[in-house]
Amino acid sequence: MEAADYEVLSVREQLFHERVRECIISTLLFATLYILCHIALTHFKKPAEFTTVDDEDATVNKIALELCTFTLAVALGAVLLLPFSIISNEVLLSLPRNYYIQWLNGSLIHGLWNFVFLFSNLSLIFLMPFAYFFTESEGFAGSRKGVLGRVYETVVMLILLTLLVLGMVWVASAIVDNNKASRESLYDFWEYYLPYLYSCISFLGVLLLLVCTPLGLARMFSVTGKLLVKPRLLEDLEEQLHCSAFEEAALTRRICNPTSCWLHLDMELLHRQVLALQTQRVLLEKRRKASAWQRNLGYPLAMLCLLVLTGLSVLIVAIHILELLIDEAAMPRGMQDASLGQVSFSKLGSFGAVIQVVLIFYLMVSSVVGFYSSPFFRSLRPRWHDTAMTQIIGNCVCLLVLSSALPVFSRTLGLTHFDLLGDFGRFNWLGNFYIVFLYNAAFAGLTTLCLVKTFTAAVRAELIRAFGLDRLPLPVSGFPRASRKTQHQ
């Protein structure tokens, strides 16, 4: 063989080893996420659904739980996708020739983006509908009972659903883009139909983030206030402990002496209320024993951090709005080649990249808080060891829609200049200036409105309660007077 043939073989062998290494790394990362998601779902599932007398129902629920675990792992991978790419770029910039990070390259990052896109399509279009129909199926009439009969019914229902969604998407494409080329492109199921359908789902996810994130940013202050110990000026723990003890004693007497013949008492509800009060009293005791540093320093610092992160997010979006008006390069776009390690995607270098990652995680957490705080999705909120299987499926679908839209959401708002990789950058609506501009303006306006309204109202309410003005006989402006029942509790 000639030297050129040996060179070609060595190049092919090197490419083969790189592909194998990338597959191993991707598998290890996904396996880690899968284990974490399985532990989380195990703590939220309802144990009675997996220990029933009917082994068939238990088997069906176990299969559905594994599908939900896979979907939740994909959702977590979508959340980590953009931060991992930004950090990888900064690491390669700082250590360009380090031997121990040669595995971290553009090919690996591009492959991870493609895997997340593929598994997101697979989970949203096939796995989650299959899991729902599988748990609700009973088998065709006249067929043998068993898991296999349920599988047949689920497959038939899934095929019918696929045909229905395919027809709806085809009709929608014909109405929006009425030309022969666009309609013929949808006949290619893999290259055009799935990305087009996922583009519609991603757009819905981005709209959902637009609504939930400002609400969650406002709710983060109250949620953090419940988790941390407030200063004595803002909270009277002794009074809360006395009220909790009085309520618990009253409920205990009602349970021990149910002498009222004309009043029907729900004993199970009373027992649950007593347990809730006991749990609340234990938490209050722990908060009373907190140190002065936790009381006087932890709460103000946490509130200050939340205020800075929220204000910084609004400021970046406002700057991005100005960039959209001046420079066309500010528009979100796709990138076919992940050229990492060449230039930083932040003007502040590594410090700016860290800020971008923190903001992305902060907005994702805020969107989840806002999602479960909204009146439409509050019923989906999971409960510890008391979440039904259908509710777990609904939570996994919603979290996947939110997380898979996070890279597009972050790039559209200008939180990062890292362009979208793979099929994430093929969405047609990303090139529409009016959609992107109005989206940024709506996010900045809604976030500012929710922040000002909620933060100022919370501060005024805490000051009024701290000085005891809520107990005055005359109502304070903007705050109704506390009722007699509330005062005596």
Image: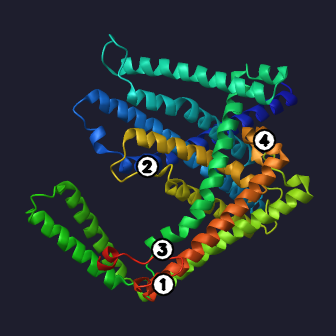
Q: Nearer the viewer, residue 168 or 45?
A: 168
Which residue is situated farthest in the front direction here? Answer: 474
Q: Position of residue 4 (x, y in %)?
A: 87, 30
Amino acid carrying mark 2 in the image: Ser
- Mark 4 and 3 residues: CB-CB less than 8 Å, in contact? no
Circle 1: element type = helix
* Residue 103 in view in this figure: no
Circle 4: element type = helix
Q: Residues within 10 Å of mark 4 (few under 14, many from 20)?
A: some
Circle 2: element type = helix
N-terminal-most mark, 1 or 2: 2
Structural distance between the alpha carbons of marks 2 and 4: 32 Å
Structural distance between the alpha carbons of marks 1 and 3: 16 Å
N-terminal-most mark, 4 or 3: 3
Amino acid carrying mark 4 in the image: Trp
Q: Nearer the viewer, residue 38 or 435?
A: 435
Structural distance between the alpha carbons of marks 4 and 1: 48 Å
